[in-house]
Amino acid sequence: MANIQLSIGKVPGGENDSGGWILECNKCHMLFPYAVKNPNDYSRVDHGATVLDSWDNEILGDKQEVIKKHNLESFPEDFRFDNLLYVETGEFERPKFSDIEENIFFCPECGTHIEPHVYSQLTHKLTSVNETIEGYMPYYLKGMLGDPDSIIILSDYQCSCEFKTKIVLYKSFKENELPIEDEHELILIDVIGAKLETNIDGIYNRDSCLQVLQKLLIRWQVYYNRVFLAVPFIGFDFKNREAQRVELWNWILKNTVPHKTTLLTRRATFNSFLEGSNNTGLDISVLKSYGLLNPTLSELTEKKALFKTDFHAKFYAGFDRMNSEVLVGSFNIHEGGYVENIHFKKYDFGDFFLKYILKMNIIFDPRFIDEEGEFLLIDESNKRVTIEKYNTSRRNKILEIINGIDNKDLPN
């Protein structure tokens, strides 16, 4: 089965059709149905498969007729395509960054929460941002100015205490999601000068730990090329906690991108997940036999899976070939009010590799870290728009641009 990448288009605040596709894998040519929103207009397959047919759930009997047409009546009816199958591009931005309650960015001068103020200020900047995007689109549609994978917005920010800096915002580049209708579609990736090492440090309950980690995972998906999760326990291994255990695994899959993510856990932890998923009606072996298992999980069912029985270390990291960010502490991936200690650290890649990866006796080749692409850069303050190519990481390119801006008021 090929690695299939989908782009799921949604109409913000509008009517979203419910239906699905009949897909053919481009590698093994297997046919299978896939439930999807807006199958006939806003959603698409980016690579790995071909759409042979579609159905509309609003048309009585349409799905059954299409499935019968392609001789797929025996396909398991209990497959849930919003669960453990694929990571869909266009989906990983949700829940919106601003919806996650725990803040990670604070003003280094007065200590107030920056995130709510950033989004309130964006309300007044959205018109100019959309005008800039609108000016770029004719060139893009004619194939004259690049093929960006994302939109990066640099904007000035001033706190009520007069602290001034720049913020970095992200949105995936999809024609059907433009113009930007709501400032909360943008993800706050960075606040230059905000000290995460100070902001993320101390005692948190498990629910708050999950929220902090979720915001970091969203940040790392954009900023860094690789994500490493070392977590001995995911959920509780109790019979009455099976559904919660499966949901926490789903949480990991929904907040990570398979080709960027390495998960290290205990074999017993993975086996308890398999048992829990089977007992709650989701047969992982069936998903795997159809080649539809999420790639992150699929790796754990292969010999190349990263399993260790002799570790109790917990750390979560985003990194590229130059830098890394690590969340460490006592926190396994659990929910509830029980308290844990966590703190945020930064290392250059060499130190991170020596202190964490090698100490865990993990075989990891650092040569395959770089990532290439290009993004549409909107410098909102200077009314400048450019296509920026990167060949190491998006983060390095963004910081290179910011460091080149002549602004002596910027904090270090």
Image: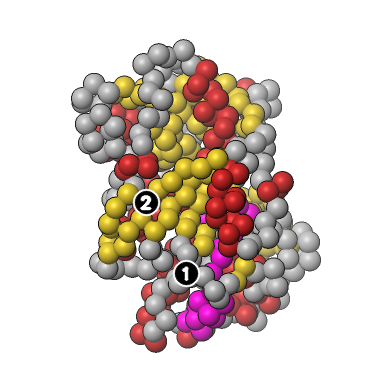
Q: Residue at x 37, y 68 (%)?
A: 334
Drawn side of residue 334 relative to residue 28, left or right: left
Residue 360 drawn above or below residue 280:
above
Circle 2 SS class: strand
Is residue 8 among what the camera can see?
Answer: no
> Does the magenta stretch mainly form a helix, a strand or a loop?
helix
Kind of residue at disc 2: His
Asked which quadrant contains residue 299, the reply is: bottom right
Q: Quadrant of the C terminus?
A: top left
Where does the image place residue 385, in percent across and percent down from the top left? 53, 20
Q: Is residue 106 left or right of residue 254?
A: left
Amino acid identity at mark 1? His
| Residue pointed to by mark 2 | 343
Task: Please name the residue shown 55% across and 25% down the image.
Answer: 400
Q: Residue at x 40, y 38 (%)?
A: 188
Towards the viewer: 353 or 321: 353
Find residue 211 and report its image quarter: bottom left
Q: Residues within 10 Å of mark 2 (few under 14, many from 20)?
A: some
Tell me where the magenta segment starts and ends, as one range: 255-277
Q: Which mark identifies residue 312?
A: 1
